[in-house]
Amino acid sequence: MIEVNSLIKSYGDKRALKGISFQVREGEIFGFLGPNGAGKTTTLRILTGQLKADSGEAKIMDLDVMKGAKELHSHIGVVPEETNLYERLTIGQNLDLFCRLYGCDIKQTDYYLERIGMLKEKNTQVKKLSKGMKQKVLLVRALLHSPKILFLDEPTSGLDPASADTIHRILRELNDQGITILLTSHNMEEVDKLCNRVAFLNQGEIVEMGSPEALKLDHSNRRIKVLIDDGHGLASKELDMDSKESARLLSEWMTEGKVRSVHSCEPTLAEIFVKVTGREFA
Amino acid sequence: MTLSFKRIGAILIKEAHDFKTNINILIMYLIPILLAYIYDNFIPGMPRGFALSFGILFLVVMVGMYVPSMMIAEEKEKKTLEVLLLSPANSVEVFIGKGLLTFISIIVSFIILIAMFGGVDPDQMAVILVGGILTAVFCIQVGIIVGLLSKNQMATGVVGTPVYMALLLVPMLGSMGSPTLEKIAKVFPTYYYNDMLYRALNEFEGNHTLLDMIPELGILLGSIAVAFVLLLLVYRRRGLG
Protein backbone atom coordinates (compact mmCIF):
# COMPACT_ATOMS: atom_id res chain seq x y z
CA MET A 1 0.00 0.00 0.00
CA ILE A 2 2.82 2.39 0.97
CA GLU A 3 6.39 1.81 -0.09
CA VAL A 4 9.24 4.08 0.89
CA ASN A 5 12.85 3.62 -0.16
CA SER A 6 15.92 5.59 0.91
CA LEU A 7 14.04 8.81 1.61
CA ILE A 8 16.32 11.76 2.31
CA LYS A 9 15.28 15.25 3.32
CA SER A 10 17.38 18.13 4.64
CA TYR A 11 16.47 21.56 5.96
CA GLY A 12 19.56 23.63 5.26
CA ASP A 13 22.45 21.86 6.95
CA LYS A 14 20.21 19.72 9.12
CA ARG A 15 19.37 16.31 7.70
CA ALA A 16 15.84 15.49 8.87
CA LEU A 17 15.59 12.10 7.13
CA LYS A 18 18.68 10.01 6.51
CA GLY A 19 17.48 7.52 3.93
CA ILE A 20 14.57 5.76 5.61
CA SER A 21 12.85 2.74 4.02
CA PHE A 22 9.69 0.94 5.07
CA GLN A 23 6.47 -0.61 3.76
CA VAL A 24 2.93 -0.41 5.06
CA ARG A 25 0.63 -3.27 4.10
CA GLU A 26 -3.03 -2.91 3.13
CA GLY A 27 -5.34 -2.91 6.16
CA GLU A 28 -2.53 -2.26 8.60
CA ILE A 29 -2.27 0.35 11.35
CA PHE A 30 1.34 1.47 11.18
CA GLY A 31 2.80 3.77 13.81
CA PHE A 32 5.76 6.08 13.61
CA LEU A 33 7.19 6.57 17.05
CA GLY A 34 9.82 9.05 17.99
CA PRO A 35 10.57 12.13 20.05
CA ASN A 36 10.00 15.66 18.74
CA GLY A 37 12.32 16.40 15.83
CA ALA A 38 12.83 12.74 14.94
CA GLY A 39 11.44 13.23 11.43
CA LYS A 40 7.91 11.84 11.85
CA THR A 41 6.03 14.86 10.54
CA THR A 42 8.56 15.34 7.72
CA THR A 43 7.92 11.75 6.60
CA LEU A 44 4.16 12.28 6.76
CA ARG A 45 4.35 15.53 4.84
CA ILE A 46 6.41 13.92 2.09
CA LEU A 47 3.99 11.00 1.84
CA THR A 48 1.00 13.32 1.58
CA GLY A 49 2.68 15.41 -1.12
CA GLN A 50 3.04 18.52 1.02
CA LEU A 51 6.82 18.42 0.98
CA LYS A 52 9.37 17.36 -1.62
CA ALA A 53 12.06 14.88 -0.59
CA ASP A 54 15.64 15.55 -1.67
CA SER A 55 16.00 11.99 -2.93
CA GLY A 56 14.53 8.53 -2.55
CA GLU A 57 11.30 6.95 -3.60
CA ALA A 58 7.82 7.01 -2.08
CA LYS A 59 4.86 5.18 -3.61
CA ILE A 60 1.30 5.01 -2.40
CA MET A 61 -0.97 2.51 -4.16
CA ASP A 62 1.71 2.36 -6.86
CA LEU A 63 1.48 6.13 -7.44
CA ASP A 64 4.73 8.04 -7.21
CA VAL A 65 4.17 10.62 -4.48
CA MET A 66 6.85 12.91 -5.93
CA LYS A 67 5.13 13.06 -9.32
CA GLY A 68 1.39 12.77 -8.84
CA ALA A 69 0.48 14.27 -5.47
CA LYS A 70 -2.83 15.71 -6.72
CA GLU A 71 -3.97 12.34 -8.12
CA LEU A 72 -3.11 10.81 -4.79
CA HIS A 73 -5.19 13.20 -2.72
CA SER A 74 -8.49 11.53 -3.64
CA HIS A 75 -7.22 8.27 -2.09
CA ILE A 76 -5.85 9.65 1.15
CA GLY A 77 -7.23 11.46 4.17
CA VAL A 78 -4.98 13.60 6.33
CA VAL A 79 -5.46 14.61 9.95
CA PRO A 80 -2.76 17.19 10.74
CA GLU A 81 -1.35 17.91 14.15
CA GLU A 82 -2.71 21.46 14.16
CA THR A 83 -6.47 21.82 14.41
CA ASN A 84 -6.64 23.75 11.17
CA LEU A 85 -10.37 24.24 10.88
CA TYR A 86 -12.09 27.48 9.88
CA GLU A 87 -12.82 28.77 13.36
CA ARG A 88 -15.50 31.32 12.46
CA LEU A 89 -17.48 28.77 10.45
CA THR A 90 -19.75 26.11 11.92
CA ILE A 91 -18.85 22.43 11.86
CA GLY A 92 -21.36 21.91 9.06
CA GLN A 93 -19.95 24.76 6.96
CA ASN A 94 -16.41 23.42 7.42
CA LEU A 95 -17.41 19.94 6.32
CA ASP A 96 -19.71 21.07 3.49
CA LEU A 97 -16.78 22.93 1.93
CA PHE A 98 -14.77 19.73 1.67
CA CYS A 99 -17.77 17.71 0.47
CA ARG A 100 -18.17 20.20 -2.37
CA LEU A 101 -14.45 20.22 -3.17
CA TYR A 102 -14.32 16.42 -3.34
CA GLY A 103 -17.66 16.26 -5.13
CA CYS A 104 -19.05 13.82 -2.58
CA ASP A 105 -22.57 13.53 -1.22
CA ILE A 106 -23.27 16.30 1.28
CA LYS A 107 -25.20 13.73 3.40
CA GLN A 108 -21.83 12.16 4.27
CA THR A 109 -21.40 15.02 6.74
CA ASP A 110 -24.44 13.97 8.79
CA TYR A 111 -23.49 10.31 8.59
CA TYR A 112 -20.03 10.84 10.06
CA LEU A 113 -21.17 13.45 12.60
CA GLU A 114 -23.75 10.95 13.80
CA ARG A 115 -21.06 8.29 14.09
CA ILE A 116 -18.89 10.43 16.33
CA GLY A 117 -21.90 11.65 18.30
CA MET A 118 -21.68 15.29 17.18
CA LEU A 119 -24.65 15.72 14.85
CA LYS A 120 -26.35 18.01 17.36
CA GLU A 121 -23.35 20.36 17.26
CA LYS A 122 -23.41 20.67 13.45
CA ASN A 123 -24.40 24.34 13.58
CA THR A 124 -21.94 25.25 16.32
CA GLN A 125 -19.05 27.54 15.44
CA VAL A 126 -15.76 25.67 15.54
CA LYS A 127 -14.17 28.26 17.85
CA LYS A 128 -16.65 27.23 20.56
CA LEU A 129 -15.56 23.56 20.53
CA SER A 130 -13.15 21.78 22.89
CA LYS A 131 -9.86 20.43 21.53
CA GLY A 132 -11.22 16.86 21.61
CA MET A 133 -14.29 17.85 19.60
CA LYS A 134 -12.16 19.73 17.06
CA GLN A 135 -9.99 16.64 16.68
CA LYS A 136 -13.08 14.55 15.91
CA VAL A 137 -14.18 17.10 13.30
CA LEU A 138 -10.72 16.92 11.72
CA LEU A 139 -11.12 13.16 11.54
CA VAL A 140 -14.54 13.47 9.89
CA ARG A 141 -13.14 16.01 7.42
CA ALA A 142 -10.44 13.51 6.42
CA LEU A 143 -13.03 10.75 5.92
CA LEU A 144 -15.66 12.56 3.83
CA HIS A 145 -14.31 11.34 0.48
CA SER A 146 -13.92 7.72 1.70
CA PRO A 147 -10.13 7.53 1.48
CA LYS A 148 -8.31 4.20 1.38
CA ILE A 149 -5.45 5.44 3.53
CA LEU A 150 -5.60 7.72 6.53
CA PHE A 151 -2.58 9.71 7.72
CA LEU A 152 -2.72 11.08 11.24
CA ASP A 153 -0.10 13.31 12.79
CA GLU A 154 -0.20 13.02 16.60
CA PRO A 155 -3.96 12.37 16.60
CA THR A 156 -4.44 12.51 20.37
CA SER A 157 -1.79 15.03 21.32
CA GLY A 158 -3.12 17.27 24.08
CA LEU A 159 -6.39 15.38 24.47
CA ASP A 160 -7.85 14.16 27.75
CA PRO A 161 -7.94 10.34 28.19
CA ALA A 162 -11.67 10.08 27.43
CA SER A 163 -11.36 11.99 24.12
CA ALA A 164 -8.24 10.00 23.22
CA ASP A 165 -10.14 6.76 23.86
CA THR A 166 -12.96 7.89 21.56
CA ILE A 167 -10.46 8.67 18.80
CA HIS A 168 -8.83 5.24 19.30
CA ARG A 169 -12.22 3.52 19.10
CA ILE A 170 -13.08 5.33 15.86
CA LEU A 171 -9.70 4.49 14.36
CA ARG A 172 -10.12 0.80 15.19
CA GLU A 173 -13.59 0.81 13.60
CA LEU A 174 -12.23 2.47 10.46
CA ASN A 175 -9.41 -0.05 10.30
CA ASP A 176 -11.95 -2.89 10.66
CA GLN A 177 -13.67 -1.46 7.58
CA GLY A 178 -10.42 -1.85 5.66
CA ILE A 179 -8.85 1.62 5.88
CA THR A 180 -5.07 1.51 6.12
CA ILE A 181 -3.79 3.87 8.78
CA LEU A 182 -0.40 5.49 9.22
CA LEU A 183 -0.03 7.58 12.34
CA THR A 184 2.76 9.38 14.11
CA SER A 185 2.87 9.63 17.85
CA HIS A 186 5.15 10.10 20.78
CA ASN A 187 2.62 8.31 22.98
CA MET A 188 3.99 4.78 23.44
CA GLU A 189 0.81 3.42 25.01
CA GLU A 190 -1.29 4.69 22.13
CA VAL A 191 0.93 3.03 19.57
CA ASP A 192 1.16 -0.18 21.60
CA LYS A 193 -2.64 -0.35 21.85
CA LEU A 194 -3.48 0.58 18.26
CA CYS A 195 -0.74 -0.43 15.86
CA ASN A 196 -0.09 -3.70 14.07
CA ARG A 197 3.47 -2.57 13.40
CA VAL A 198 5.62 0.31 14.58
CA ALA A 199 8.82 1.98 13.46
CA PHE A 200 11.05 3.84 15.90
CA LEU A 201 12.35 6.99 14.30
CA ASN A 202 15.35 8.65 15.88
CA GLN A 203 17.27 11.58 14.40
CA GLY A 204 16.01 10.83 10.91
CA GLU A 205 16.68 7.07 10.97
CA ILE A 206 14.49 4.05 11.56
CA VAL A 207 16.25 2.26 14.37
CA GLU A 208 13.74 -0.52 14.97
CA MET A 209 10.63 -1.83 13.25
CA GLY A 210 8.13 -4.63 13.87
CA SER A 211 4.93 -5.48 15.70
CA PRO A 212 4.79 -4.20 19.29
CA GLU A 213 4.59 -7.82 20.55
CA ALA A 214 7.55 -8.96 18.46
CA LEU A 215 9.65 -5.97 19.54
CA LYS A 216 8.86 -6.61 23.17
CA LEU A 217 9.72 -10.31 22.84
CA ASP A 218 12.93 -9.55 20.94
CA HIS A 219 14.09 -7.20 23.68
CA SER A 220 12.80 -9.31 26.55
CA ASN A 221 15.29 -10.37 29.24
CA ARG A 222 13.36 -13.67 29.42
CA ARG A 223 12.50 -13.35 33.06
CA ILE A 224 9.19 -13.73 34.87
CA LYS A 225 7.94 -12.06 38.00
CA VAL A 226 6.07 -14.33 40.40
CA LEU A 227 4.09 -13.08 43.36
CA ILE A 228 3.83 -15.72 46.06
CA ASP A 229 2.27 -15.96 49.46
CA ASP A 230 4.94 -17.65 51.61
CA GLY A 231 2.85 -17.67 54.76
CA HIS A 232 4.36 -14.41 56.11
CA GLY A 233 2.84 -12.20 53.44
CA LEU A 234 3.30 -11.53 49.73
CA ALA A 235 6.78 -11.76 48.23
CA SER A 236 7.88 -10.96 44.70
CA LYS A 237 10.37 -13.30 43.01
CA GLU A 238 12.05 -12.96 39.63
CA LEU A 239 12.91 -16.11 37.72
CA ASP A 240 14.89 -16.84 34.59
CA MET A 241 12.59 -18.35 31.94
CA ASP A 242 15.28 -20.60 30.52
CA SER A 243 16.55 -22.22 33.71
CA LYS A 244 15.54 -25.67 34.98
CA GLU A 245 15.81 -24.36 38.54
CA SER A 246 13.14 -21.71 37.77
CA ALA A 247 10.83 -24.39 36.37
CA ARG A 248 11.33 -26.50 39.44
CA LEU A 249 10.68 -23.58 41.82
CA LEU A 250 7.59 -22.43 39.95
CA SER A 251 6.21 -25.95 39.84
CA GLU A 252 6.85 -26.34 43.57
CA TRP A 253 5.12 -23.02 44.44
CA MET A 254 2.18 -23.88 42.21
CA THR A 255 1.84 -27.33 43.77
CA GLU A 256 1.91 -25.74 47.21
CA GLY A 257 -0.72 -23.18 46.13
CA LYS A 258 1.55 -20.24 46.91
CA VAL A 259 1.41 -18.49 43.53
CA ARG A 260 -0.74 -15.34 43.45
CA SER A 261 0.32 -13.98 40.03
CA VAL A 262 2.84 -14.61 37.25
CA HIS A 263 3.98 -11.92 34.82
CA SER A 264 6.54 -12.03 32.08
CA CYS A 265 8.97 -9.11 32.21
CA GLU A 266 8.85 -7.75 28.63
CA PRO A 267 10.06 -4.19 28.35
CA THR A 268 7.68 -1.40 27.36
CA LEU A 269 8.11 0.26 23.97
CA ALA A 270 9.55 3.28 25.78
CA GLU A 271 12.19 1.10 27.44
CA ILE A 272 13.05 -0.50 24.10
CA PHE A 273 13.43 2.96 22.55
CA VAL A 274 15.86 4.03 25.28
CA LYS A 275 17.76 0.74 24.91
CA VAL A 276 18.04 1.07 21.13
CA THR A 277 18.83 4.77 20.87
CA GLY A 278 20.55 5.43 24.18
CA ARG A 279 18.39 8.52 24.62
CA GLU A 280 15.38 9.29 26.77
CA PHE A 281 12.03 9.45 25.01
CA ALA A 282 10.80 13.00 25.50
CA MET B 1 -3.93 22.36 -14.28
CA THR B 2 -7.69 22.19 -14.73
CA LEU B 3 -10.10 24.70 -13.26
CA SER B 4 -13.42 23.55 -11.85
CA PHE B 5 -16.32 25.97 -11.45
CA LYS B 6 -17.75 23.66 -8.77
CA ARG B 7 -14.60 23.95 -6.67
CA ILE B 8 -14.35 27.71 -7.24
CA GLY B 9 -18.03 27.91 -6.20
CA ALA B 10 -17.29 25.86 -3.07
CA ILE B 11 -14.49 28.24 -2.08
CA LEU B 12 -16.69 31.24 -2.86
CA ILE B 13 -19.50 29.89 -0.63
CA LYS B 14 -17.01 29.24 2.17
CA GLU B 15 -15.59 32.76 1.83
CA ALA B 16 -19.10 34.23 1.89
CA HIS B 17 -19.91 32.38 5.14
CA ASP B 18 -16.61 33.49 6.64
CA PHE B 19 -17.03 37.07 5.42
CA LYS B 20 -20.27 37.50 7.38
CA THR B 21 -18.53 36.85 10.70
CA ASN B 22 -15.18 38.51 10.00
CA ILE B 23 -15.34 41.87 11.79
CA ASN B 24 -11.85 42.95 10.60
CA ILE B 25 -12.92 42.72 7.00
CA LEU B 26 -16.49 44.00 7.43
CA ILE B 27 -15.15 47.23 8.97
CA MET B 28 -13.08 47.86 5.85
CA TYR B 29 -16.27 47.99 3.78
CA LEU B 30 -17.86 50.47 6.16
CA ILE B 31 -14.93 52.93 6.06
CA PRO B 32 -15.43 54.23 2.47
CA ILE B 33 -19.18 54.55 3.00
CA LEU B 34 -18.64 56.39 6.27
CA LEU B 35 -15.89 58.64 4.85
CA ALA B 36 -17.96 59.58 1.84
CA TYR B 37 -20.92 60.35 4.12
CA ILE B 38 -18.78 62.55 6.42
CA TYR B 39 -17.17 64.40 3.48
CA ASP B 40 -20.58 64.99 1.95
CA ASN B 41 -22.46 66.06 5.07
CA PHE B 42 -20.00 67.53 7.55
CA ILE B 43 -17.36 69.37 5.50
CA PRO B 44 -18.71 72.74 4.29
CA GLY B 45 -18.21 73.48 0.62
CA MET B 46 -17.12 69.96 -0.27
CA PRO B 47 -18.28 69.18 -3.83
CA ARG B 48 -20.55 66.11 -3.91
CA GLY B 49 -18.49 64.61 -6.72
CA PHE B 50 -15.34 64.70 -4.60
CA ALA B 51 -16.95 62.95 -1.65
CA LEU B 52 -18.30 60.21 -3.89
CA SER B 53 -15.09 59.78 -5.87
CA PHE B 54 -13.06 59.57 -2.64
CA GLY B 55 -15.40 56.88 -1.29
CA ILE B 56 -15.24 54.90 -4.55
CA LEU B 57 -11.46 55.19 -4.82
CA PHE B 58 -10.99 54.04 -1.22
CA LEU B 59 -13.40 51.15 -1.75
CA VAL B 60 -11.92 49.90 -4.99
CA VAL B 61 -8.24 50.43 -4.14
CA MET B 62 -7.93 49.93 -0.40
CA VAL B 63 -10.60 47.25 0.10
CA GLY B 64 -9.54 45.57 -3.14
CA MET B 65 -6.01 45.09 -1.83
CA TYR B 66 -6.65 44.65 1.89
CA VAL B 67 -9.33 41.93 1.79
CA PRO B 68 -7.56 39.27 -0.34
CA SER B 69 -4.24 39.93 1.40
CA MET B 70 -5.84 39.30 4.80
CA MET B 71 -7.74 36.24 3.56
CA ILE B 72 -4.58 34.59 2.20
CA ALA B 73 -2.39 35.60 5.16
CA GLU B 74 -4.97 34.24 7.61
CA GLU B 75 -5.15 30.91 5.78
CA LYS B 76 -1.35 30.69 5.88
CA GLU B 77 -1.21 31.67 9.54
CA LYS B 78 -3.86 29.16 10.62
CA LYS B 79 -2.55 26.49 8.23
CA THR B 80 -5.99 26.02 6.66
CA LEU B 81 -4.47 26.57 3.22
CA GLU B 82 -2.50 23.32 3.60
CA VAL B 83 -5.60 21.24 3.97
CA LEU B 84 -7.37 23.11 1.20
CA LEU B 85 -4.52 22.18 -1.12
CA LEU B 86 -4.67 18.55 0.03
CA SER B 87 -8.17 18.47 -1.48
CA PRO B 88 -8.72 18.45 -5.26
CA ALA B 89 -8.67 22.30 -5.17
CA ASN B 90 -5.60 23.94 -6.65
CA SER B 91 -4.03 27.28 -5.81
CA VAL B 92 -5.52 29.08 -8.85
CA GLU B 93 -9.03 28.02 -7.79
CA VAL B 94 -8.30 29.27 -4.28
CA PHE B 95 -7.13 32.65 -5.65
CA ILE B 96 -10.12 32.95 -7.96
CA GLY B 97 -12.58 32.02 -5.18
CA LYS B 98 -11.14 34.59 -2.81
CA GLY B 99 -10.76 37.23 -5.52
CA LEU B 100 -14.31 36.69 -6.72
CA LEU B 101 -15.77 37.20 -3.25
CA THR B 102 -13.77 40.43 -2.90
CA PHE B 103 -14.88 41.57 -6.33
CA ILE B 104 -18.58 40.83 -5.75
CA SER B 105 -18.54 42.52 -2.35
CA ILE B 106 -16.83 45.61 -3.82
CA ILE B 107 -19.52 45.86 -6.51
CA VAL B 108 -22.29 45.56 -3.88
CA SER B 109 -20.68 48.30 -1.74
CA PHE B 110 -20.14 50.38 -4.88
CA ILE B 111 -23.89 50.25 -5.63
CA ILE B 112 -24.68 51.20 -2.01
CA LEU B 113 -22.33 54.19 -2.27
CA ILE B 114 -23.85 55.40 -5.53
CA ALA B 115 -27.37 54.94 -4.14
CA MET B 116 -26.37 56.92 -1.04
CA PHE B 117 -25.53 59.86 -3.30
CA GLY B 118 -28.85 59.62 -5.15
CA GLY B 119 -27.42 57.86 -8.21
CA VAL B 120 -25.41 59.13 -11.20
CA ASP B 121 -26.30 59.57 -14.85
CA PRO B 122 -25.64 56.67 -17.28
CA ASP B 123 -22.48 58.23 -18.81
CA GLN B 124 -20.97 58.82 -15.40
CA MET B 125 -21.98 55.31 -14.34
CA ALA B 126 -20.30 53.73 -17.36
CA VAL B 127 -17.01 55.55 -16.62
CA ILE B 128 -16.86 54.90 -12.89
CA LEU B 129 -18.12 51.30 -13.18
CA VAL B 130 -15.88 50.11 -16.02
CA GLY B 131 -12.87 51.92 -14.55
CA GLY B 132 -13.79 50.59 -11.12
CA ILE B 133 -14.02 47.01 -12.37
CA LEU B 134 -10.59 47.19 -14.02
CA THR B 135 -9.01 48.93 -11.00
CA ALA B 136 -10.58 46.39 -8.64
CA VAL B 137 -9.17 43.47 -10.67
CA PHE B 138 -5.73 45.10 -10.57
CA CYS B 139 -5.93 45.81 -6.83
CA ILE B 140 -7.20 42.32 -5.98
CA GLN B 141 -4.16 40.86 -7.74
CA VAL B 142 -1.89 43.21 -5.78
CA GLY B 143 -3.68 42.13 -2.59
CA ILE B 144 -3.05 38.46 -3.40
CA ILE B 145 0.65 39.28 -3.96
CA VAL B 146 0.78 41.02 -0.55
CA GLY B 147 -0.89 37.95 1.01
CA LEU B 148 1.65 35.64 -0.63
CA LEU B 149 4.56 37.74 0.62
CA SER B 150 3.20 37.91 4.19
CA LYS B 151 3.74 35.11 6.69
CA ASN B 152 0.70 36.03 8.75
CA GLN B 153 -2.01 38.66 9.14
CA MET B 154 0.25 40.94 11.17
CA ALA B 155 2.87 40.89 8.42
CA THR B 156 0.35 42.12 5.84
CA GLY B 157 0.60 45.47 7.66
CA VAL B 158 4.37 45.63 7.15
CA VAL B 159 4.31 44.34 3.59
CA GLY B 160 1.07 45.95 2.54
CA THR B 161 1.01 49.44 4.06
CA PRO B 162 3.65 50.99 1.75
CA VAL B 163 1.87 49.45 -1.25
CA TYR B 164 -1.56 50.61 -0.06
CA MET B 165 -0.26 54.13 0.60
CA ALA B 166 1.48 54.31 -2.76
CA LEU B 167 -1.59 53.17 -4.67
CA LEU B 168 -4.17 55.16 -2.70
CA LEU B 169 -2.53 58.34 -1.42
CA VAL B 170 0.04 59.21 -4.08
CA PRO B 171 -2.53 59.41 -6.92
CA MET B 172 -4.74 61.61 -4.74
CA LEU B 173 -1.86 63.92 -3.81
CA GLY B 174 -0.75 63.93 -7.45
CA SER B 175 -4.03 65.40 -8.54
CA MET B 176 -3.71 68.36 -6.15
CA GLY B 177 -1.58 70.59 -8.36
CA SER B 178 2.07 69.75 -7.66
CA PRO B 179 3.79 68.87 -10.99
CA THR B 180 6.45 66.74 -9.21
CA LEU B 181 3.86 64.74 -7.29
CA GLU B 182 1.81 64.36 -10.44
CA LYS B 183 4.82 62.96 -12.31
CA ILE B 184 5.35 60.39 -9.55
CA ALA B 185 1.65 59.63 -9.31
CA LYS B 186 1.43 58.86 -13.02
CA VAL B 187 3.52 55.73 -12.38
CA PHE B 188 0.59 54.21 -10.49
CA PRO B 189 -2.46 52.92 -12.40
CA THR B 190 -4.78 54.09 -9.64
CA TYR B 191 -3.88 57.69 -10.63
CA TYR B 192 -5.71 57.14 -13.90
CA TYR B 193 -8.84 55.81 -12.18
CA ASN B 194 -8.74 58.75 -9.79
CA ASP B 195 -8.52 61.01 -12.84
CA MET B 196 -11.44 59.23 -14.49
CA LEU B 197 -13.52 59.64 -11.34
CA TYR B 198 -12.63 63.33 -11.12
CA ARG B 199 -13.51 64.00 -14.74
CA ALA B 200 -16.73 61.99 -14.63
CA LEU B 201 -18.06 63.29 -11.32
CA ASN B 202 -16.87 66.89 -11.18
CA GLU B 203 -19.59 69.18 -12.49
CA PHE B 204 -17.01 71.71 -13.78
CA GLU B 205 -15.33 69.14 -16.00
CA GLY B 206 -18.17 68.89 -18.48
CA ASN B 207 -19.80 65.68 -19.62
CA HIS B 208 -17.26 62.91 -20.17
CA THR B 209 -18.16 59.55 -21.64
CA LEU B 210 -16.34 56.23 -21.60
CA LEU B 211 -15.03 56.92 -25.10
CA ASP B 212 -13.07 59.90 -23.76
CA MET B 213 -11.27 57.59 -21.39
CA ILE B 214 -9.80 55.06 -23.81
CA PRO B 215 -6.13 55.83 -22.91
CA GLU B 216 -6.87 55.48 -19.19
CA LEU B 217 -8.73 52.21 -19.76
CA GLY B 218 -5.78 50.95 -21.82
CA ILE B 219 -3.38 51.79 -18.98
CA LEU B 220 -5.62 49.98 -16.48
CA LEU B 221 -5.82 46.91 -18.74
CA GLY B 222 -2.04 46.93 -19.14
CA SER B 223 -1.64 47.23 -15.37
CA ILE B 224 -3.83 44.15 -14.90
CA ALA B 225 -1.55 42.21 -17.23
CA VAL B 226 1.59 43.43 -15.41
CA ALA B 227 0.10 42.58 -11.99
CA PHE B 228 -0.85 39.11 -13.30
CA VAL B 229 2.72 38.43 -14.46
CA LEU B 230 4.04 39.71 -11.12
CA LEU B 231 1.58 37.46 -9.29
CA LEU B 232 2.79 34.44 -11.26
CA LEU B 233 6.43 35.29 -10.50
CA VAL B 234 5.78 35.72 -6.79
CA TYR B 235 3.71 32.52 -6.65
CA ARG B 236 6.39 30.52 -8.45
CA ARG B 237 9.08 31.87 -6.16
CA ARG B 238 7.26 31.82 -2.85
CA GLY B 239 4.47 29.31 -3.38
CA LEU B 240 1.71 29.26 -0.83
CA GLY B 241 3.75 28.17 2.16
Image: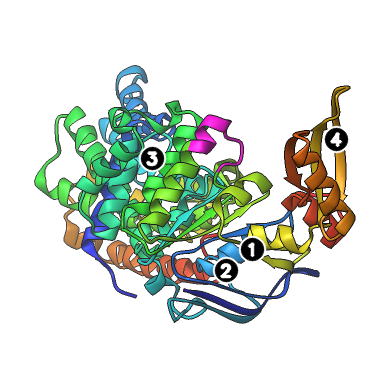
**Three-letter amino acid code of the residue under disc 1:** Thr
Q: Nearer the viewer, mark 4 or mark 3?
A: 4
In which chain is the residue bearing label 3?
B
Which disc is residue A46 wearing?
Answer: 2
Q: Nearer the viewer, mark 1 or mark 3?
A: 1
Q: Nearer the viewer, mark 2 or mark 4?
A: 4
Q: From which residue to which does the magenta span run?
A: A156-165
Q: Is residue B37 magenta?
A: no
Farthest left residue in view: B122
| Residue B42 visible from this viewpoint | yes
Left or right: residue A82 compared with residue B41: right
In the rendered image, which residue does mark 3 sit on? Answer: B58
Q: CA distance from mark 4 to mark 1?
A: 45 Å
Q: Nearer the viewer, mark 4 or mark 1?
A: 4
In the rendered image, which residue does mark 4 sit on? Answer: A236
Residue at 21% in and 48% down: A106
